[in-house]
Amino acid sequence: MVFIPISDDNPLRSIRFQWVTLGLVVANVLIYLVGVIGGGDDNPAWVASFALVPSELFHLQGAGDASAPPAPALMVPGWLTLITYQFLHSGALHVLTNMLFLWVFGDNVEDAMGHLKFLVFYLLCGVAAGLAQAAALPSSQYPVVGASGAVAGVIAAYLMLHPKVRVWVLVFRFLPLRVAAGWVLGLWVVTQVAMVVMASVDPGVAWWAHVGGLAAGAVLVLFMRRPGVPLFDRGSASPPII
């Protein structure tokens, strides 16, 4: 990862605190810890119960690769895994990275939408991300997990709402730099699209889910933001992007 977001210079305007963003971060971390205590990667049947498996979602069992996951410990309907998969993660770095992005950028998107609409927005972006990944690889029996698609939707919404806001990031994990969100998040978006084109570079990453979440976030923010909330920092006093 080229950059790691730390914070942004973007105060809340309509809500007092980002309760939904905090709740989602806590839920994801707690579920990950429960998975670690309960066996985590050593209990693949538990993962298979709640992860999104494209071949099961589309009822194409037996049509995928030979390395099929074990039978799930619980029979969870395929449609429900479009929600549950968003709260599973494959490792500590996976969950921490997703939650850091959500914490830095989610509060202002929640502020632009309100608590309840933001929660619906977040889950819908995750559903769209899962459907995009499943549609791209419909016969895959490889479990898809992670909040990356939902967080990608948050990033797309933030980019459309506040491209001029300055964001503190760590470049190459150690160099602090303050840049406009339009540059740093725009680079992230371009990277995700490029990785879809070169998906064979890392087949273990659900790049289509990232792009699906981005597309959903960009569309949904147009309709789910509060009346009067402008796009692209129109009317703001922010300095020009450099």
Image: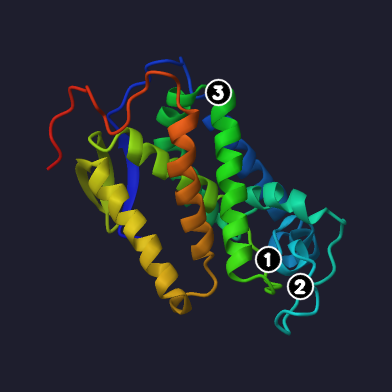
Q: Residue at the spot x=61%, y=71% of the render?
A: 137
Q: In this figure, which residue is indicated by the disc labeled 2?
A: 69
Closer to the camera in the image, 148 or 127? 127
Looking at the picture, how far across and down is residue 52, in whole percent? 69, 59
Quadrant where the N terminus lies?
bottom left
* Picture coordinates of residue 22, whole percent (x, y): 54, 30
What residue is shown with label 1? Answer: 143
Residue at disc 2, secondary structure: loop
Q: Earlier in the sequence, mark 1 or mark 2?
A: 2
Dot 1 falls on a residue whose secondary structure is loop
Q: Is residue 229 above or below residue 160?
A: above
Is 33 left or right of 15, judged from the image as shown? right
Q: Which residue is mark 3?
A: 115
Horizontal placement of 236 versus 10: left or right? left
Three-letter amino acid code at disc 3? His
Which mark is first along the chain, 3 or 1? 3
Q: Are marks 1 and 2 in contact (CB under 8 Å)?
A: yes
Q: Amino acid at mark 2?
A: Pro
Amino acid type of the residue tagged 1 in the rendering: Pro
Q: As displayed, is residue 55 above or below residue 22?
A: below
